[in-house]
Amino acid sequence: MAVPKRKTSKAKRDKRRASSYRLPKVTLVKDKETDELIVPHRVNPYTGMYKGRKVIDVE
């Protein structure tokens, strides 16, 4: 059975555990029609369009 040769320090252990708490990077794409940055695969909040179709009414 494998046994660690040295004790892992608290700092090393905590750094390893903290890597999963980072905020995910937000992916943004430029809209072809309005040139605004939007989140992909969502309804465009500025135009109400999704996949080339009008989905919601925007004032």
Image (cartoon, rainbow, N blue to C red):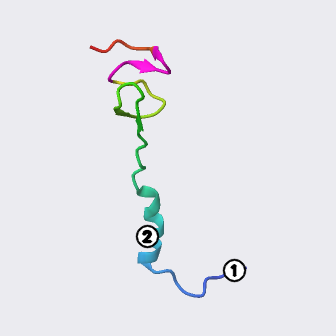
Q: How many marks?
A: 2
The answer to whether 5 appears left or right of 50 in the picture is right
The kind of residue tagged 1 is Ala
Place of residue 58 in the rendered image (x, y in percent of width and height, measured from the top left): 31, 15
Determine which quarter of the picture holds residue 27. Answer: top left
Q: Which mark is residue 2?
A: 1
Place of residue 49 in the rendered image (x, y in percent of width and height, measured from the top left): 42, 19
Q: Which mark is residue 19?
A: none
Along the line of sight, the residue nearer the viewer: 32 or 29: 32
From which residue to which does the magenta span run?
Answer: 46-53
User: Is mark 2 in CB contact (under 8 Å) with mark 1?
Assistant: no
Place of residue 33 in the rendered image (x, y in percent of width and height, measured from the top left): 39, 24
Q: Look at the numbered disc 1 and give the secondary structure of its residue.
A: loop
Q: Residue at x 42, y 56 (%)?
A: 21
Comes first in the chain, label 2 or label 1:
1
Place of residue 2 in the rendered image (x, y in percent of width and height, measured from the top left): 69, 80
Determine which quarter of the picture holds residue 12. Answer: bottom left
The kind of residue tagged 2 is Lys
Principal secondary structure, stretch drawn in magenta = loop
Can you identify the residue that label 2 sits on? 15
Q: Look at the numbered disc 2 and give the secondary structure of its residue.
A: helix
